[in-house]
């Protein structure tokens, strides 16, 4: 479990954090916060270096897109989902729990 301040997250810009030794991509979309594994399921690329459009993040290396809400792979070349993490918001605090 890792807790960060909501204001550490810029809306529409992913951020890489560590949760129990795992790299996690955290994204703020409006007032919502989502967390998925930071490693693309297609290649060993950091998703937090990608671009966000709506609720999707695009891997910068090969263009695969993932749903930030569930970790589902949305476009090739990725066909496997990435892990999603539970996010608990309490005022200005955001806690990322272990994998769902």
Image (cartoon, rainbow, N blue to C red):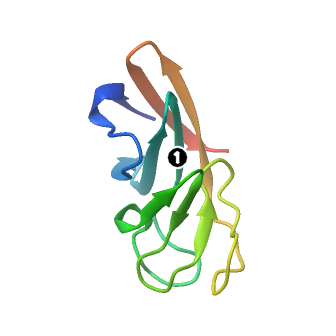
Frontmost residue, 71 versus 31? 31
Give the residue displayed 70% in from the left and 70% down from the top.
74
| Left or right: residue 64 compared with residue 17 | right
In this view of the protein, can residue 95 be seen by the observer? yes
Residue 25 drawn at (x, y percent): 44, 54
As drawn, which residue projects farthest toward the left? 8
Residue 16: which quarter of the image? bottom left
Residue 39 drawn at (x, y percent): 47, 69
Can you say whether 79 is above or below 68 in the image?
below
In which quadrant will I find the C terminus?
Answer: top right
| Left or right: residue 70 compared with residue 7 | right
Frontmost residue, 27 versus 12? 12
Residue 37 drawn at (x, y percent): 52, 59
Q: Which residue is mark 1?
A: 35
In this view of the protein, can residue 5 be seen by the observer? no
Residue 41 drawn at (x, y percent): 58, 76
Q: Residues within 10 Å of mark 1 (few under 14, many from 20)?
A: many
């Amino acid at each position: 479990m890792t807790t960060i301040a909501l204001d550490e997250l810029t809306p529409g810009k992913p951020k890489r954090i560590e949760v129990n030794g795992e790299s996690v991509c955290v994204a703020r979309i409006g007032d919502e916060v989502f967390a998925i594994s930071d490693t693309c399921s297609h290649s060993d690329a950091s998703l937090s270096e990608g671009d966000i459009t709506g609720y999707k993040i695009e891997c910068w290396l090969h263009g695969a897109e993932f749903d930030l809400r569930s970790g589902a792979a949305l476009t090739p070349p990725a066909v496997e989902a990435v892990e999603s993490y539970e996010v608990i918001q309490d005022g200005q605090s955001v806690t990322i729990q272990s994998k769902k």
